[in-house]
Amino acid sequence: MKVAPSVLSADFGNLQRDIEEICSAGCDLVHVDVMDGHFVPNLTIGPVVVSAIAKAATKPLDIHLMVQNNTFFVELFAPLKPEYISFHIEEEKHPHRLIQKIRSLGIKPAIVLNPHTPPESIEFLLADLDMVLLMSVNPGFGGQSFIDSVIPKAKRLSAMRDTINPNCLIEVDGGVSDKNIQALKDVGVDIVVAGSYVFNHTDKKQAIQSLQI
């Protein structure tokens, strides 16, 4: 299991320190939540702060867009060369076109599904994706409780993935901890996003390793 700590839970007064700490503690990716205050009722960070994160990080960035006007934000963050840019299917009218655009920029495209959105909604996009991110909380805020229905949902997605595009990774974001990590692994999840569980832990290395099962 790969672990992508969410910067949303970091101490923004000591952001460089926290980014360096999770990278040296052995995380696999650095998850960056970008919210515009429109698609979700919260406003987080823009390119100046994400650029600072990119400079401090020694692991690849995993940028999760929770925004309207996805194309604008893709173009905004593409120069930072993240490993992944993921966008919400609920907000994009032309997802296939945007997937092609992200890939043309040398970045791996990913789609995000809100808790209520079924895996079947992306059946005809799955072949073109490098990753699917399942929200296991409602997007917009950190520190929420895990929504248990993501487990059977991930199992359904995993079966689709294995048939259509076995190379596509499955990521889960929200409320992940050592209490549910085994259940996620058992249904085929490849990457977990963990914010408060990692950043609020007294030993970040131990927290990360407890999820890398």
Image: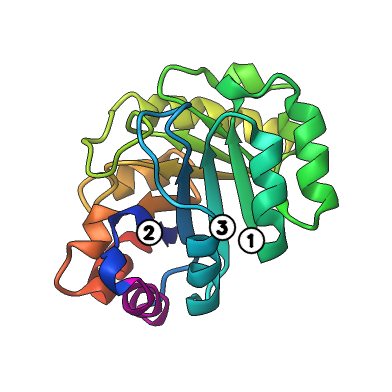
Question: Which callout, 1 or 3, points to the residue nearer the camera?
Answer: 3
Q: Are marks 3 and 2 in contact (CB under 8 Å)?
A: no
Callout 2, which amino acid? Val
Can you tell which mark lies on residue 47?
A: 3
Name the outermost residue toward the left. 202
Residue 119 spot, x, y in % from top left? 56, 22
Residue 77 spot, x, y in % from top left? 64, 54
Which of the two labelled residues, at mark 2 and mark 1, occupies the earlier sequence position?
2
| Residue that appears at 79% across and 29% down | 96
**Residue 141 quadrant:** top left
| Residue that appears at 26% across and 62% down | 198
Which of the two labelled residues, at mark 3 and mark 2, occupies the earlier sequence position?
2
* Within-10-Å neighbours for mark 2: few <14, some 14–19, many 20+: many
Q: Is residue 53 magenta?
A: no
- The colour scheme applied to this rendered structure is rainbow
In-front residue for pair 203/6: 6
Residue 208 spot, x, y in % from top left? 32, 67
* Within-10-Å neighbours for mark 1: few <14, some 14–19, many 20+: many
Callout 1, which amino acid? Pro
Callout 3, which amino acid? Pro
| Residue that appears at 54% across and 77% down | 55
Q: Quadrant of the C terminus?
A: bottom left
Q: Is residue 91 above or below residue 207?
A: above
Where does label 1 land, which residue? 82
* Residue 20 visible from this viewpoint: yes
Left-right relation of 171 to 87: left
- Secondary structure at badge 3 equals helix
Q: Are marks 2 and 1 in contact (CB under 8 Å)?
A: no
Where does label 2 land, which residue? 7
- Secondary structure at badge 1 equals loop
